[in-house]
Amino acid sequence: MDFIAGAGATNVDLLYCGMERIPGVGEELYSKDFSIQLGGGLPATLINLGRLGIKTKIATELGKDIFSNFAKEKFLQNGVEPVNLYNGNGFGLNVTSAILLPHDRTFITYGKGSIEPDEKGMETFYKIASGSKICMMQLGGFLPVYKKLHSEGTILVLDTGWDDEMSFEKYDEYLSLADYYTPNRKEALKITGTTNEKDAAYALKKYFDRVVVKVDADGCIGIDKDDYFFCPSIKEFKNVDSTGAGDAFLAGFMYGLFYDYSLKDCIEFGNITGGKAVTAVGALSAYVTEDELKAYKNSI
């Protein structure tokens, strides 16, 4: 059990930066900066883990287009082994054009958003994920695979993202199966039906002995059985772009789980990786190496 696995859609972001406004219909504006990067989500978390020296594998959908080739190259450069589930002739992934304004952002995305696996896709994912120490969970069609992995002793970490209809009732099957769930403040309040993050954290004890609630830029709440604590964010990290912060937090958190650290240590690792991620534009521009991560941790 020497690796971490996950299955999810790949996103490529075309980032237009340094614009004061969005062009109107019939207008053309020039941005001061531009870059092409892999976007956020499960792939970004696995890449951050690969950068920390952990062997990772992803089941995803990649076509034969230039964006899919770019994504595959980035996976391999960062220590992530991609296994393709896509059998079509078009774009297997999502491509997003993002205009980053001084105080807001806007997006246009081409793609279907998530993976809807067939039986062959689930079999392929199970083959690459079987034997993993940790597997990332997402909502969707891979639930039968998660169940098999759980029965084999793989640690399951659930990250749902926002849903207007999220609730314990809707997500019960996933929450009951997961070993860890990592909602942010807004998600935790919504899914528990509570009005403050501390109450939300205790409400999650219904499912978890070890609770994690990210409190945005402030830090993170943890409950380890009966021990409630709060880990503040790293103040030296200044927010430039919050894209990918949650994905990076999850990488640091799972780094700690992978090496059997305490829950508090795992959260502190997550605060470091998540905090560093916001210091540059893009989901994967700013990150820490394993040596840097340990140095920051020792200074807390």
Image (tube, rainbow, N blue to C red):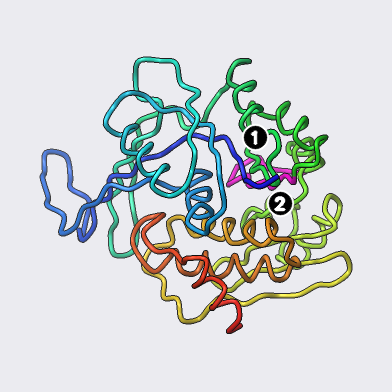
Of the numbered discs 1 and 2, the one sitting upstream in the chain is 1
Residue lying furthest front:
2
Q: What amino acid is at disc 2?
A: Tyr
Mark 1: few, some, or many residues within 10 Å (few <14, many ≥20)? Answer: many
Count of numbered badges drawn on the protein: 2
Query: Please, is residue 26 above or below residue 282 in the view?
Result: above
- Is residue 238 inside the magenta stretch? no
| Residue name at image x 19 percent, y 57 percent | 33
Amino acid on which disc 1 is placed? Ala
User: Residue 35 vs residue 259: left or right?
Assistant: left
Asked whether 278 or 70 is in front, the reply is 70
Q: Position of residue 189 (x, y in %)?
A: 69, 57
Q: CA distance from mark 1 to mark 2?
A: 19 Å
Quarter of the image for residue 31 reads: bottom left
Q: Quick check: 237 above or below 210?
A: below
Q: Residue furthest bottom?
A: 299
Query: Of helix, strand and loop, which mostly describes the magenta segment?
Result: loop
Drawn side of residue 263 relative to residue 116, left or right: right
What's drawn in magenta, residue-wise? 155-168
- x then y, percent, for residue 299: 58, 84
Q: Residue at x 45, y 76 (%)?
A: 237
Secondary structure beneath label 1: helix
Q: Residue 285's x, y, as percent?
A: 36, 59
Identify the disc placed on residue 129.
1
Position of 127 with respect to 169 (left or right) is: left
- Residue at label 2? 181
* Residue 157 falls inside the magenta stretch: yes
Pointer 2: residues within 10 angstroms few (<14), some, or many (20+)?
A: many
Q: Secondary structure at mark 2?
A: strand
